[in-house]
Amino acid sequence: MPFADELIGTQTVRALTASLETVRPDLGLTAVRATEGALARLSLRERSDLLRDALLADLGGDYPTLAATVREACDRAESFTGWLIWPVTSAVVAKAIEDGSAGAFDDALALMAELTPRLTAEFAIRGLLNHDLDRALSTIRGWVASEDEHVRRLATEGTRPFLPWSVRVPGILVEPRSTLPILHALYRDDSEYVRRSVANHLNDLSRREPDLVVETAAAWLGAPGDAEVTRENTRRLVRHGLRTLVKQGHPGALGLLGFTPAAVEVTGPVLATDVVAVGEVLTFTASIRNTGTEAAQLAVDYVIHHRKANASQTAKTFKLTTCRLAPGEAVDLGKQHSFRVLTTRRYHAGEHALELQVNGVRYGRVSFTLTAPPGG
């Protein structure tokens, strides 16, 4: 994953100023230029917000003037693409909401669809959803029929309940069924890009409405009349959309994917060492035998119980493998789990634990000690 300054950095500011100068050489863009020295130590969204505010300060005027400038940049400026689009779309939304008219609101939605192929308008569109959810969704639901896969994806990605880097839309969290018509229309989309977004949206919904998600996925899997390639696409989408529920051991999700309760004998996990340093890997092995009289389809995960700052532990589940075992058949497993330093996780030295999870049932919890990195 690139760092924030690789996504929105000085090169973004310069591309933005060059694009706007192509169509409005009179602007000066003092505020936009000044952001170059202020981006350090800001998060990605904070960088976008800073550029949004600078754009609004430099461009001034009313919504129609801003929209016209943006559209002209689309037509004439080759550099008007990439991560600079995020603050541009945010400025458009802010100005449309400030305008307060239905015409500006509807035009801003149209402009989101025009801009989204240049990067994505998924973050900015949430401002319109928060301002008037029903009006926005009425238009967005129509995008599912667009010939442009980027616009169809915007319909599902922009309305995700827990879209990363974005503001929440409380109305969607309160009424999760409000976005289901979009998902129903797009889960068989020809584009993998769109279907992947549908799967991620479904996974988001599972955080609040697991039973609704299983019900929806079951309906999609049971829909008649598809060619085999479409059925396989749907199965792949459902597996991805149910991934969190599978890790949580949700019986309905596991059963829908064929991971029913099974008679198994689990040996392990066995650790190569019970002490590992931050930056190193924890190696473990295990074996699973089907002791039942029928073949068993198994979803095998492992759970790391991370030590927190207050000495309590919090569990995180990681995918290991899936397999099918005939009666009496066994499989040997091995894994190296990395404790390399990540910006998204802070490690705390002390006792941790590991256990396997087979079809939602946990086995063989074993403790180990995580120490500070060598020389740290």
Image (tube, helix red, strand yellow):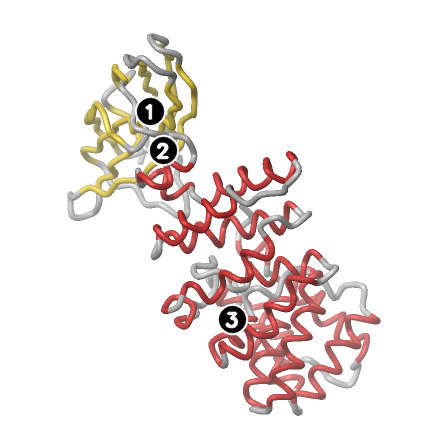
Q: Are marks 1 and 2 in contact (CB under 8 Å)?
A: yes
Which residue type carries mark 3?
Answer: Arg
Mark 3 or 2, nearer chain start:
3
Which is more foreground, mark 3 or mark 2? 3
Image: 247 above or below 63? above
Occupied quadrant, residue 68? bottom right
Q: Are marks 1 and 3 in contact (CB under 8 Å)?
A: no
Mark 1 or 3, nearer chain start:
3
Q: What secondary structure is marked by label 3?
A: helix
Where does residue 325 sit, x and y in percent of width and height? 39, 15
Q: Residue at x 48, y 64 (%)?
A: 166
Crowdedness of circle 3 by 10 Å Cα count: few (<14), some, many (20+)?
A: many
Is any part of residue 289 visible from this angle?
A: no
Crowdedness of circle 1 by 10 Å Cα count: few (<14), some, many (20+)?
A: many
Separation of residues labelled 1 and 3 (CA atoms):
41 Å
Is any part of residue 62 visible from this angle?
A: yes
Where does residue 296 sit, x and y in percent of width and height? 37, 20
Separation of residues labelled 3 and 2 (CA atoms):
35 Å
Residue denoted by label 2:
339
> Any mark on residue 282, and which?
1
Separation of residues labelled 1 and 2 (CA atoms):
8 Å
